[in-house]
Amino acid sequence: MSLVAAAFVLPLANGQSKLQDNPENSPQTKAQATPKTERAPTYRLVELPLRPLAISDSGWVTGNTADHTAARWSSQSGLEHISLPSEFVLSEGTGINSKGDAVGVAFTTDSSRSVAFLFRQGKTSLLPGEQSRADGINDAGEIIGQSKPPGQKAVGPVQWKNDTLLDLKICCAGTARRINGNSQIIGDTYDLKGHYHAFLWDTEHGSRLLSTAGEEYSSALALNPRGEVVVRAVPGGLFLYSAGRFEPIDAPQAAVRGLNKDEVVVGSFGTNPEAQRAFVWDKAHGLRDLNALIGANAGWKLEVATGINDRGEIVGWGDHGETENAGFLLVPLGKSKIPASRSSSAAPERTPAR
Protein backbone atom coordinates (compact mmCIF):
# COMPACT_ATOMS: atom_id res chain seq x y z
CA MET A 1 0.00 0.00 0.00
CA SER A 2 1.08 3.57 -0.63
CA LEU A 3 2.13 5.71 2.32
CA VAL A 4 -0.74 7.65 3.86
CA ALA A 5 -0.24 11.34 4.56
CA ALA A 6 -0.99 12.18 8.15
CA ALA A 7 -2.22 15.72 7.53
CA PHE A 8 -4.82 15.39 4.82
CA VAL A 9 -5.67 12.77 2.22
CA LEU A 10 -8.48 13.13 -0.26
CA PRO A 11 -10.86 10.20 -0.64
CA LEU A 12 -9.58 9.79 -4.21
CA ALA A 13 -5.83 9.93 -3.63
CA ASN A 14 -3.74 8.05 -6.21
CA GLY A 15 -6.85 7.10 -8.17
CA GLN A 16 -8.23 4.78 -5.49
CA SER A 17 -11.56 5.60 -3.88
CA LYS A 18 -14.79 4.30 -2.51
CA LEU A 19 -16.21 4.93 -5.95
CA GLN A 20 -14.74 1.75 -7.36
CA ASP A 21 -16.04 -0.18 -4.36
CA ASN A 22 -19.51 1.17 -4.99
CA PRO A 23 -20.04 0.54 -8.72
CA GLU A 24 -23.82 0.60 -8.49
CA ASN A 25 -23.55 4.40 -8.42
CA SER A 26 -22.57 4.34 -12.09
CA PRO A 27 -25.00 3.47 -14.88
CA GLN A 28 -22.10 1.91 -16.75
CA THR A 29 -21.81 -0.94 -14.26
CA LYS A 30 -24.64 -2.91 -15.84
CA ALA A 31 -22.52 -3.27 -18.97
CA GLN A 32 -19.28 -4.55 -17.49
CA ALA A 33 -16.18 -4.07 -19.66
CA THR A 34 -14.61 -7.45 -20.35
CA PRO A 35 -10.83 -7.27 -20.79
CA LYS A 36 -9.68 -8.59 -24.13
CA THR A 37 -6.98 -11.23 -24.40
CA GLU A 38 -3.98 -11.33 -26.70
CA ARG A 39 -2.26 -14.28 -28.37
CA ALA A 40 1.22 -12.80 -28.73
CA PRO A 41 3.13 -10.68 -26.18
CA THR A 42 2.84 -6.94 -26.73
CA TYR A 43 5.34 -5.87 -24.06
CA ARG A 44 8.72 -6.98 -22.76
CA LEU A 45 8.87 -7.00 -18.96
CA VAL A 46 11.76 -5.56 -16.95
CA GLU A 47 11.82 -6.23 -13.21
CA LEU A 48 12.59 -3.12 -11.15
CA PRO A 49 14.33 -2.91 -7.75
CA LEU A 50 11.68 -0.54 -6.40
CA ARG A 51 7.92 -0.19 -6.30
CA PRO A 52 7.38 2.51 -8.94
CA LEU A 53 4.86 5.33 -8.76
CA ALA A 54 5.87 7.44 -11.77
CA ILE A 55 7.86 7.31 -15.01
CA SER A 56 9.14 10.21 -17.11
CA ASP A 57 9.24 10.45 -20.89
CA SER A 58 13.00 9.78 -20.81
CA GLY A 59 12.54 6.60 -18.76
CA TRP A 60 13.43 7.79 -15.25
CA VAL A 61 11.36 6.00 -12.60
CA THR A 62 10.67 6.91 -8.97
CA GLY A 63 8.88 5.21 -6.09
CA ASN A 64 9.99 3.46 -2.91
CA THR A 65 12.02 0.40 -2.00
CA ALA A 66 11.02 -2.52 0.21
CA ASP A 67 12.15 -0.64 3.33
CA HIS A 68 9.76 2.24 2.49
CA THR A 69 12.40 4.74 1.45
CA ALA A 70 12.23 6.93 -1.65
CA ALA A 71 14.39 6.06 -4.63
CA ARG A 72 14.80 6.61 -8.34
CA TRP A 73 15.97 4.30 -11.13
CA SER A 74 17.01 4.40 -14.76
CA SER A 75 18.32 1.69 -17.06
CA GLN A 76 21.65 3.50 -17.31
CA SER A 77 22.17 4.67 -13.72
CA GLY A 78 20.50 1.83 -11.85
CA LEU A 79 18.92 2.29 -8.40
CA GLU A 80 19.67 5.39 -6.33
CA HIS A 81 18.28 5.91 -2.83
CA ILE A 82 17.06 9.39 -1.91
CA SER A 83 18.54 10.44 1.41
CA LEU A 84 16.50 12.51 3.88
CA PRO A 85 17.10 13.92 7.39
CA SER A 86 17.12 11.15 10.01
CA GLU A 87 13.84 12.25 11.60
CA PHE A 88 11.99 11.16 8.44
CA VAL A 89 11.86 7.38 8.46
CA LEU A 90 9.26 6.73 5.74
CA SER A 91 9.32 8.24 2.27
CA GLU A 92 8.29 7.70 -1.33
CA GLY A 93 9.01 9.33 -4.66
CA THR A 94 5.78 10.38 -6.33
CA GLY A 95 6.85 12.29 -9.44
CA ILE A 96 9.87 12.60 -11.73
CA ASN A 97 10.77 14.58 -14.83
CA SER A 98 12.88 13.82 -17.89
CA LYS A 99 16.00 15.25 -16.21
CA GLY A 100 15.68 12.76 -13.33
CA ASP A 101 14.55 15.37 -10.79
CA ALA A 102 12.30 13.53 -8.32
CA VAL A 103 9.76 14.79 -5.80
CA GLY A 104 7.85 13.07 -3.05
CA VAL A 105 6.81 13.00 0.58
CA ALA A 106 8.50 11.93 3.82
CA PHE A 107 7.06 11.21 7.26
CA THR A 108 8.33 11.17 10.82
CA THR A 109 8.12 7.97 12.87
CA ASP A 110 4.72 8.82 14.39
CA SER A 111 3.46 10.39 11.13
CA SER A 112 2.85 13.65 13.00
CA ARG A 113 4.77 15.56 10.35
CA SER A 114 4.94 15.22 6.60
CA VAL A 115 7.21 17.17 4.29
CA ALA A 116 7.55 17.54 0.53
CA PHE A 117 11.02 17.08 -0.94
CA LEU A 118 12.93 17.62 -4.18
CA PHE A 119 15.84 15.41 -5.23
CA ARG A 120 17.99 17.08 -7.89
CA GLN A 121 21.57 16.41 -9.01
CA GLY A 122 22.22 14.10 -6.08
CA LYS A 123 20.98 16.51 -3.40
CA THR A 124 17.73 16.51 -1.41
CA SER A 125 16.00 19.72 -0.37
CA LEU A 126 12.89 20.05 1.78
CA LEU A 127 10.22 22.25 0.25
CA PRO A 128 8.60 25.07 2.25
CA GLY A 129 5.16 24.61 3.82
CA GLU A 130 3.51 22.69 6.64
CA GLN A 131 2.12 19.16 6.35
CA SER A 132 3.11 19.12 2.70
CA ARG A 133 3.27 16.54 -0.05
CA ALA A 134 4.68 16.89 -3.58
CA ASP A 135 3.02 14.82 -6.30
CA GLY A 136 4.40 16.00 -9.62
CA ILE A 137 7.17 17.93 -11.37
CA ASN A 138 7.49 19.03 -14.99
CA ASP A 139 10.63 19.50 -17.06
CA ALA A 140 10.71 23.21 -16.16
CA GLY A 141 11.07 22.22 -12.49
CA GLU A 142 7.59 23.39 -11.45
CA ILE A 143 6.31 21.22 -8.59
CA ILE A 144 2.73 20.67 -7.42
CA GLY A 145 1.05 19.00 -4.47
CA GLN A 146 -0.61 20.00 -1.23
CA SER A 147 0.49 22.04 1.77
CA LYS A 148 -0.80 24.36 4.44
CA PRO A 149 0.05 27.88 3.25
CA PRO A 150 0.83 30.54 5.87
CA GLY A 151 -2.34 31.77 7.57
CA GLN A 152 -4.47 28.84 6.35
CA LYS A 153 -6.14 26.26 8.60
CA ALA A 154 -6.21 23.40 6.10
CA VAL A 155 -3.93 22.04 3.41
CA GLY A 156 -4.79 22.98 -0.14
CA PRO A 157 -3.53 22.77 -3.72
CA VAL A 158 -0.14 24.46 -4.09
CA GLN A 159 2.72 24.94 -6.49
CA TRP A 160 6.42 25.30 -5.73
CA LYS A 161 8.31 27.49 -8.17
CA ASN A 162 11.92 28.57 -7.68
CA ASP A 163 11.78 27.21 -4.10
CA THR A 164 8.77 29.43 -3.33
CA LEU A 165 5.42 28.09 -2.13
CA LEU A 166 2.49 29.45 -4.16
CA ASP A 167 -1.10 29.00 -3.00
CA LEU A 168 -3.36 28.22 -5.99
CA LYS A 169 -6.18 29.87 -4.01
CA ILE A 170 -8.84 27.30 -4.85
CA CYS A 171 -11.73 26.99 -2.41
CA CYS A 172 -11.81 25.10 -0.04
CA ALA A 173 -8.90 22.78 0.75
CA GLY A 174 -7.79 19.98 -1.55
CA THR A 175 -4.75 18.81 -3.49
CA ALA A 176 -2.97 19.29 -6.79
CA ARG A 177 -2.19 15.93 -8.38
CA ARG A 178 -0.46 16.37 -11.76
CA ILE A 179 1.29 19.07 -13.83
CA ASN A 180 2.28 18.96 -17.51
CA GLY A 181 4.80 20.82 -19.64
CA ASN A 182 2.34 23.64 -20.31
CA SER A 183 2.04 24.31 -16.56
CA GLN A 184 -1.52 22.98 -16.56
CA ILE A 185 -2.42 21.50 -13.17
CA ILE A 186 -5.19 19.09 -12.16
CA GLY A 187 -6.45 18.08 -8.76
CA ASP A 188 -9.44 18.00 -6.45
CA THR A 189 -10.98 20.68 -4.27
CA TYR A 190 -13.83 20.79 -1.79
CA ASP A 191 -16.84 23.06 -2.08
CA LEU A 192 -18.60 24.73 0.85
CA LYS A 193 -20.85 21.67 1.26
CA GLY A 194 -17.89 19.34 1.68
CA HIS A 195 -18.20 17.74 -1.77
CA TYR A 196 -15.00 17.28 -3.75
CA HIS A 197 -14.71 18.22 -7.42
CA ALA A 198 -12.11 17.89 -10.17
CA PHE A 199 -10.37 21.06 -11.30
CA LEU A 200 -8.05 22.17 -14.11
CA TRP A 201 -5.79 25.18 -13.48
CA ASP A 202 -3.54 27.23 -15.72
CA THR A 203 -1.89 30.64 -15.50
CA GLU A 204 -4.21 32.21 -18.09
CA HIS A 205 -7.60 31.06 -16.82
CA GLY A 206 -6.92 30.17 -13.21
CA SER A 207 -9.03 27.33 -11.81
CA ARG A 208 -12.12 25.87 -13.45
CA LEU A 209 -14.15 22.92 -12.26
CA LEU A 210 -14.47 19.90 -14.55
CA SER A 211 -18.10 19.23 -13.72
CA THR A 212 -20.33 16.75 -15.53
CA ALA A 213 -24.11 17.02 -15.66
CA GLY A 214 -25.76 15.95 -12.42
CA GLU A 215 -22.57 15.04 -10.57
CA GLU A 216 -22.34 15.11 -6.79
CA TYR A 217 -18.62 14.40 -6.60
CA SER A 218 -15.77 14.19 -9.08
CA SER A 219 -12.01 13.67 -9.11
CA ALA A 220 -9.26 14.46 -11.64
CA LEU A 221 -7.14 11.32 -11.95
CA ALA A 222 -4.67 11.81 -14.81
CA LEU A 223 -3.35 14.51 -17.14
CA ASN A 224 -1.45 14.39 -20.42
CA PRO A 225 0.69 16.96 -22.30
CA ARG A 226 -2.30 18.03 -24.42
CA GLY A 227 -4.28 19.11 -21.37
CA GLU A 228 -6.65 16.14 -21.56
CA VAL A 229 -7.88 14.84 -18.21
CA VAL A 230 -9.39 11.58 -16.97
CA VAL A 231 -12.21 12.44 -14.57
CA ARG A 232 -14.32 10.17 -12.40
CA ALA A 233 -17.75 11.53 -11.55
CA VAL A 234 -20.49 10.27 -9.24
CA PRO A 235 -22.92 9.59 -10.68
CA GLY A 236 -21.54 9.13 -14.17
CA GLY A 237 -18.36 7.06 -14.11
CA LEU A 238 -15.13 7.69 -16.01
CA PHE A 239 -14.70 10.38 -18.67
CA LEU A 240 -11.93 11.72 -20.89
CA TYR A 241 -12.12 15.51 -20.82
CA SER A 242 -10.77 16.99 -24.05
CA ALA A 243 -11.35 20.39 -25.68
CA GLY A 244 -14.24 21.16 -23.36
CA ARG A 245 -16.08 17.88 -23.91
CA PHE A 246 -16.52 14.78 -21.74
CA GLU A 247 -16.26 11.44 -23.53
CA PRO A 248 -17.28 8.35 -21.51
CA ILE A 249 -14.68 5.64 -20.85
CA ASP A 250 -16.19 2.16 -20.60
CA ALA A 251 -14.25 0.86 -17.59
CA PRO A 252 -16.60 0.98 -14.57
CA GLN A 253 -14.37 -0.92 -12.12
CA ALA A 254 -11.14 0.79 -13.13
CA ALA A 255 -8.93 2.92 -10.89
CA VAL A 256 -7.04 5.20 -13.27
CA ARG A 257 -3.46 6.26 -12.56
CA GLY A 258 -1.92 7.41 -15.83
CA LEU A 259 -2.64 8.95 -19.26
CA ASN A 260 -0.24 9.71 -22.11
CA LYS A 261 -0.35 11.96 -25.18
CA ASP A 262 -1.97 9.21 -27.28
CA GLU A 263 -4.93 8.96 -24.87
CA VAL A 264 -3.72 5.61 -23.53
CA VAL A 265 -4.92 5.06 -19.96
CA VAL A 266 -3.44 2.73 -17.33
CA GLY A 267 -4.39 1.67 -13.81
CA SER A 268 -5.99 -1.30 -12.07
CA PHE A 269 -9.40 -2.96 -12.18
CA GLY A 270 -11.28 -5.53 -10.15
CA THR A 271 -14.19 -6.07 -7.81
CA ASN A 272 -12.00 -5.66 -4.72
CA PRO A 273 -8.37 -4.83 -3.84
CA GLU A 274 -7.39 -8.51 -3.61
CA ALA A 275 -8.67 -9.17 -7.13
CA GLN A 276 -7.17 -6.14 -8.85
CA ARG A 277 -5.22 -6.50 -12.09
CA ALA A 278 -3.25 -3.97 -14.10
CA PHE A 279 -4.88 -2.70 -17.29
CA VAL A 280 -4.26 -0.56 -20.35
CA TRP A 281 -7.10 1.17 -22.22
CA ASP A 282 -7.37 3.02 -25.50
CA LYS A 283 -10.19 3.87 -27.85
CA ALA A 284 -9.18 1.28 -30.44
CA HIS A 285 -8.89 -1.75 -28.12
CA GLY A 286 -10.93 -0.89 -25.04
CA LEU A 287 -9.87 -2.28 -21.65
CA ARG A 288 -7.12 -4.92 -21.80
CA ASP A 289 -5.62 -6.92 -18.96
CA LEU A 290 -1.86 -6.31 -19.04
CA ASN A 291 -1.30 -9.87 -17.85
CA ALA A 292 -2.54 -11.04 -21.25
CA LEU A 293 0.02 -8.86 -23.04
CA ILE A 294 3.28 -10.17 -21.53
CA GLY A 295 3.16 -13.84 -22.49
CA ALA A 296 1.62 -16.83 -20.72
CA ASN A 297 4.85 -18.01 -19.09
CA ALA A 298 6.01 -14.69 -17.66
CA GLY A 299 5.53 -15.86 -14.05
CA TRP A 300 3.95 -12.58 -12.99
CA LYS A 301 0.59 -11.34 -11.78
CA LEU A 302 0.52 -7.65 -12.70
CA GLU A 303 -1.76 -5.96 -10.17
CA VAL A 304 -1.41 -2.19 -10.56
CA ALA A 305 -0.12 0.02 -13.37
CA THR A 306 0.88 3.36 -11.86
CA GLY A 307 2.15 5.34 -14.82
CA ILE A 308 2.70 5.52 -18.58
CA ASN A 309 4.98 7.84 -20.53
CA ASP A 310 4.67 9.20 -24.06
CA ARG A 311 6.82 6.34 -25.38
CA GLY A 312 4.15 3.92 -24.16
CA GLU A 313 6.31 2.46 -21.37
CA ILE A 314 4.29 1.39 -18.33
CA VAL A 315 5.36 0.96 -14.71
CA GLY A 316 3.59 -0.66 -11.79
CA TRP A 317 3.78 -3.56 -9.38
CA GLY A 318 2.51 -7.07 -8.86
CA ASP A 319 3.43 -10.53 -7.64
CA HIS A 320 6.44 -12.40 -9.06
CA GLY A 321 6.89 -15.88 -7.66
CA GLU A 322 7.21 -15.50 -3.89
CA THR A 323 7.77 -11.74 -4.14
CA GLU A 324 4.80 -9.48 -3.53
CA ASN A 325 4.61 -5.86 -4.72
CA ALA A 326 7.50 -6.38 -7.10
CA GLY A 327 8.08 -3.47 -9.44
CA PHE A 328 7.89 -3.84 -13.20
CA LEU A 329 8.47 -1.85 -16.36
CA LEU A 330 6.68 -2.84 -19.56
CA VAL A 331 8.43 -1.83 -22.78
CA PRO A 332 6.48 -1.98 -26.07
CA LEU A 333 8.21 -4.61 -28.19
CA GLY A 334 10.66 -3.22 -30.72
CA LYS A 335 10.70 0.30 -29.26
CA SER A 336 13.50 0.36 -26.68
CA LYS A 337 16.94 -0.96 -25.73
CA ILE A 338 16.16 -1.23 -22.03
CA PRO A 339 17.75 -4.39 -20.52
CA ALA A 340 15.60 -7.52 -20.54
CA SER A 341 13.94 -8.81 -17.38
CA ARG A 342 16.00 -10.80 -14.88
CA SER A 343 15.10 -13.12 -12.04
CA SER A 344 13.33 -11.72 -8.99
CA SER A 345 16.54 -11.76 -6.95
CA ALA A 346 18.62 -9.79 -9.44
CA ALA A 347 18.78 -6.03 -9.92
CA PRO A 348 18.47 -4.59 -13.44
CA GLU A 349 21.67 -4.46 -15.44
CA ARG A 350 23.72 -1.31 -14.84
CA THR A 351 25.36 0.57 -17.69
CA PRO A 352 27.48 3.71 -17.52
CA ALA A 353 25.59 6.81 -16.34
CA ARG A 354 24.84 9.55 -18.82
Image: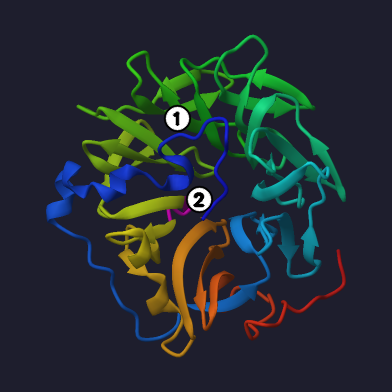
Please identify the quadrant where the C terminus is shown: bottom right
Q: In the rendered structure, which segment of residues is drawn in magenta?
A: 258-264
Residue drawn where x is 81% and y is 66% of the image:
77
Q: Are marks 2 and 1 in contact (CB under 8 Å)?
A: no
Marks 2, 1: nearer the viewer: 1
Q: Is residue 283 left or right of residue 351?
A: left
Say which element carries label 2. Answer: loop
Q: Going by the image, does 231 lie left or right of 302?
A: left
**Number of marks in picture:** 2
Above or below 58: residue 157: above
Instruction: Tell me the residue at 73%/58% (across/down).
Output: 72
Q: Which residue is mark 1?
A: 188
Which mark, residue 261?
2
Q: Is residue 260 magenta?
A: yes
Looking at the picture, which amino acid does disc 2 mark? Lys
Q: CA distance from mark 2 to mark 1?
A: 22 Å
